[in-house]
Amino acid sequence: MTFGLMAKDCEIRIDYDKLRKDRLRKTNEQMKQDGIAVLLCFDPDWIRYITSTKANDWANNKLLRSVLFAADREPILYELGSAIEAKKELCPWIADRMHPSIGTWRGAFPREVVTENALKFAKMVNAHLKELGLENEPLGLDITEIPILQSLEAEGVTVVDGQQTLLEASKIKTPEEVELIETSISIVEAAFWEVVNTAKPGVRELDIAAMMRDVMYRYGAEEMQNINVISGNRSHPHPHDFSDRMLRMGDMLFIDVVSVFNGYKTCYYQTFCIGKPSKKQLDVYRQTYEWLFAAIDLVKPGVSTADIAAVWPSAEELGLSGEAEAFALQVGHGIGITHWGKPVISRFFSFDHPEIIEEGMVLAFETYCGHGNDGARIEEQFVVTESGVRMLSKFPSRDLIACPCVGSLLP
């Protein structure tokens, strides 16, 4: 169910005010359940989840922004100083709770400034903790730089893991979150359609990656965190990247897209063939599809991740030395404002540490099969319902699609 790419005055589409409040509520509830009174987050995904603010892609790996969130209080945003005035106008829900971030830009400042700023930041955080009456409470932290961590501890702040709390808080999706994920998926499907109609001998993997970015940005995607485009003899074993390889007649081609729409991610693989596929290619594709839907067909509330992992082939069956080497060839994972969320399903650990599937989870399952110079990868995304799943991804995957003409080519 998607209603449009824009908010409208004349229709109820995504209720963003409700989305903001629900995310804060879920985080607050999980903090209380975990006994964590206050969180400090540097990860851009969690900053957005808690504050509904963002900087563009360039800031994602700088660790320059952060948020302090105490249970039953409003979040405090440590924002890039030169962005504060704009944020006051654009983000009124947090306008009076912003302070200039005192960071190190991943250590790029002079060494003395790195040390000084880390101490200044720790003192600022500790001052806010004291104002909140939480200076003696452990501080749940997601990620940070070593100088920041050391300075917080020097200030007497006890730091604990806050990532698990955030991942648990975001595990069950609200209807607004599900719609944002599905809308994000629909944008990728528009790009897949262009692949079907343009992939041909002479087109390079990087040309496809560029074309898909163009399509998705035009439809409103915020960023592309990943586009794997893998073809021909590069398709087995799986290299997880793209290159300047030129497509040739008879190549298998699979593509993975991690794109972002209003904060919500996709993880979406589809496989195609350049021209008519061989019997071997059809067999490889069919096996990939069967492994995928054997797992999806098991999904419903109460099912264990171990039960799902059991239908996938072992590392030994794949000719590999162990499950660590086979990890992520057949895998399931939560998806939402984070690319990977709870639960993660794999033969690597799900048998020993099973988790239970719950209604409202949004999951992405992906499987892979390869033989000789041919490999196939398919991934579908769905929301868990009371009785099973509702598919969010809708690009046809039952049959291997030949490019540039659409159609079923299975016997």
Image (spheres, rainbow, N blue to C red):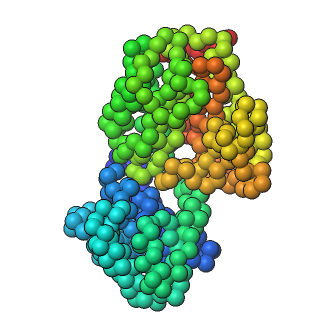
Vertical comparison of 5 with 343: above or below: above
Q: Is residue 183 visible in this depiction of the protein?
A: no
Q: Position of residue 51 (x, y in %)?
A: 40, 66
Q: Position of residue 126 (x, y in %)?
A: 41, 84
Q: Is residue 336 visible in this depiction of the protein?
A: yes
Q: Position of residue 195 (x, y in %)?
A: 43, 23
Q: Position of residue 334 (x, y in %)?
A: 59, 50
> The C terminus lies in which quarter of the figure?
top right
Residue visible at 39% across and 14% down? 202
Residue 83 sits in which quadrant?
A: bottom left
Vertical comparison of 235 with 35: above or below: above
User: In the displayed image of the protein, which residue is found farthest to the front?
Assistant: 111
Residue visible at 48% across and 86% down? 156
Q: Would residue 96 be found to the left or right of residue 363 on screen?
A: left
Residue 219 sits in which quadrant?
A: top left
Residue visible at 48% across and 80% down? 153
Q: Nearer the viewer, residue 178 or 349?
A: 349
Residue visible at 28% across and 72% down? 113
Vertical comparison of 136 with 396: above or below: below
Vertical comparison of 203 with 176: above or below: above
The total number of labels drawn is: 0
